[in-house]
Image: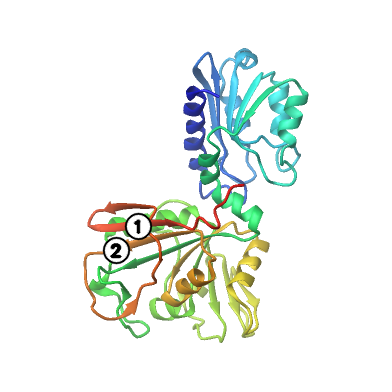
Amino acid sequence: MSDRDEIYMRRCFELARKGLGFTHTNPLVGCVIVHQNRIIGEGYHHEFGGPHAEVNAIRSVKDPSLLAESTLYCSLEPCAHHGKTPPCSMLITQKGIGRVVISNLDPFPSVNGAGVRQMEAAGIHIESGCLEGEGFYTNRRFFLYLKQKRPYVILKWAQTADGFMDLEREPGDPVGPNWIAGELSRTLVHKWRSEEAAIMVGTNTVITDNPHLNVRRWTGDDPVRVTIDRNGRISKSANILNGKQETIVFTGEKGYYTGRTRRIQVDPSYGLSDLLEELYEQHIISVLVEGGARLLESFLKEGLWDEARVFTGNMFFSQGVRAPTILKTPDDSIHIGDTGLDLYLNEQNLIYK
């Protein structure tokens, strides 16, 4: 593979990311078709159940007669099975495309190399492994969901310069002037919410903050709301139980929730690994955990996290609710206005091979 191949593959990744938040539980896939070093077609997987990236890219080519002399680049192995859409490997074969470059093989059991074998059997020259690490990172939610059979877990919190998440507040006390992160950072959080399948908070966060946990500052779908209420402490009037948004409550109490709220019965021994297993069974590919401190610390202690995004403001509280601590240096650090953002990856979980 050449440097030029890598350029076109990076364009595939760029296209694939356009589907973030819309393809659950399908992967993010981008596709580029090149004829004589010129892109003649592009496409990506827009939404779950819709046409795949390869289909959209082939449809975008204005002169189909060029396909036989073209190279198709795809960030993930073309599918080889009939699902909600026909096999992409069959379409590529029918169009007479002679060369296909792939970043990652698809670990989904119905594919898992079958797409490559079908195309090779038809005489198509296949090259795989182009920017394999970048391809894995693009689809890290999908790969972890399939291989570890749990959602991809992203932890998020904001802390003061002296390491506090919040003041000690009574339920219903407003945050008021004590917002740690700036306006732009809070808008970014709503963008993140639109990108993940679910959002999760603990009992105390629901009681103290009464959050809506929806997408208001960005466009996109609301995530599934998830909370743990072992002893039935959350008021039935809480915003999270308003029935307007799909919501899952893990609880030891019996009761009925209205609208789109579902109860999952748990016993005292029910742990985070059990909860993530249940979310996997509910086809939730990723979850953004927004608090509180005790819940975040539990995910960190048990190693059940894959990514953490930590805002640090420039104010000092001196006392209050201590923020969790991650015992490693950030993988990346940026500034958003006057707020710092540290990004962490849990490399122990994010192993491609």
**Secondary structure under the numbered disc 2 in the rendered image:** strand
Q: Where is residue 85 in the image (x, y as percent from the top left)?
A: 70, 38
Image position of 330 with respect to 298: above or below: above
Q: Which residue is drawn at 62% across and 37% down?
A: 52
Q: What mark, if any, has residue 342 been given in the picture?
A: 1
Residue 181 in which image quadrant: bottom left
- Kind of residue sitting beneath label 1: Asp
Q: Which residue is drawn at 49% across and 17% down?
A: 38
Among numbered discs 1 and 2, the one appearing first in the sequence: 2
In the rendered image, which quarter contains the N terminus?
top right
Residue 217 shows in the view = no
Structural crowding at the residue carrying mark 1, measured as other residues with C-alpha within 10 Å and reported as few (<14), some (14–19) or many (≥20): some
Q: Where is residue 235 in the image (x, y as percent from the top left)?
A: 49, 83
Image position of 90 with respect to 316: above or below: above
- Kind of residue sitting beneath label 2: Thr
* 161 with respect to 291 (left or right): left
Q: Position of residue 290 (x, y in %)?
A: 44, 67
Q: Where is residue 265 in the image (x, y as percent from the top left)?
A: 66, 79
Q: Nearer the viewer, residue 200 or 126?
A: 126
Structural crowding at the residue carrying mark 2, measured as other residues with C-alpha within 10 Å and reported as few (<14), some (14–19) or many (≥20): many
Count of numbered circles in the view: 2
Q: What mark, if any, has residue 164 been given in the picture?
A: none
Pointers 1 and 2 in contact (CB under 8 A)? yes
Q: Nearer the viewer, residue 324 or 22?
A: 324
Q: Which residue is drawn at 75% across and 36% down?
A: 114
Q: What mark, if any, has residue 312 been given in the picture?
A: 2
C-alpha gap between disc 1 and disc 2: 8 Å
* 107 with respect to 294 (left or right): right
